[in-house]
Image (cartoon, rainbow, N blue to C red):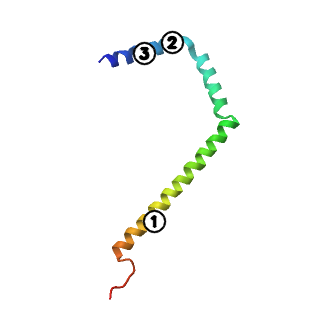
Amino acid sequence: MRGKLIFVAGAAVGFVLGARAGRDRYDQIAERTSKLWHSRAVQRQVVKAEDFAGAKAADGVDAIVEGIKFVLTKLVGGGKKKK
């Protein structure tokens, strides 16, 4: 219960301070954040992260396909004829 009260009090303080800062300050923060996000250095890292994630996703798909092939081979009998 104490944690909830602290959270509500913190939210109230944040609301009041945010309201005092006003829309101009919000726009200023949003503009700076946008400039940072679109900067060359950040976008270079974004591309690296996307490439890494794409490669890992492709590896995951390959592993799933191989797993399905393995299971199907076991279910069908592996293509080996019994004598």
Question: Which numbered disc, 3 or 1, marks the residue closer to the eye?
Answer: 1
Mark 2 element type: helix
User: In front: 39, or 18?
Assistant: 39
Question: Which numbered disc, 1 or 2, marks the residue closer to the eye?
Answer: 1
Q: Earlier in the sequence, mark 3 or mark 1?
A: 3
Q: Give the spatial CA distance, label 1 vs label 2.
A: 56 Å
Q: In the figure, 69 relative to 57: above or below?
A: below
Mark 1 element type: helix
Residue tagged 1: 66
Question: Which numbered disc, 2 or 3, marks the residue closer to the eye?
Answer: 3
The dot on residue 10 is 3
The quadrant where residue 74 appears? bottom left
User: In front: 16, or 64?
Assistant: 64
Q: Going 70% across and 37% down the picture, which residue do you hit?
A: 40
Q: Residues within 10 Å of mark 3 (few under 14, many from 20)?
A: few
Residue type marked 2? Leu
Q: Give the spatial CA distance, label 2 vs label 3.
A: 11 Å
Q: Position of residue 15 (x, y in %)?
A: 47, 15
Q: In the rendered view of the protein, which quadrant contains the N terminus?
A: top left
Mark 3 element type: helix
Residue tagged 2: 17
Residue type marked 1? Glu
* 66 to the left or right of 28: left
Q: In the figure, 76 relative to 3: above or below?
A: below
* 53 to the left or right of 83: right
Residue at the front extreme, as displayed:
83
Q: In the figure, 45 relative to 28: above or below?
A: below
Q: In the rendered view of the protein, which quadrant contains the C terminus?
A: bottom left
* 20 to the left or right of 74: right
Q: Earlier in the sequence, mark 1 or mark 2?
A: 2
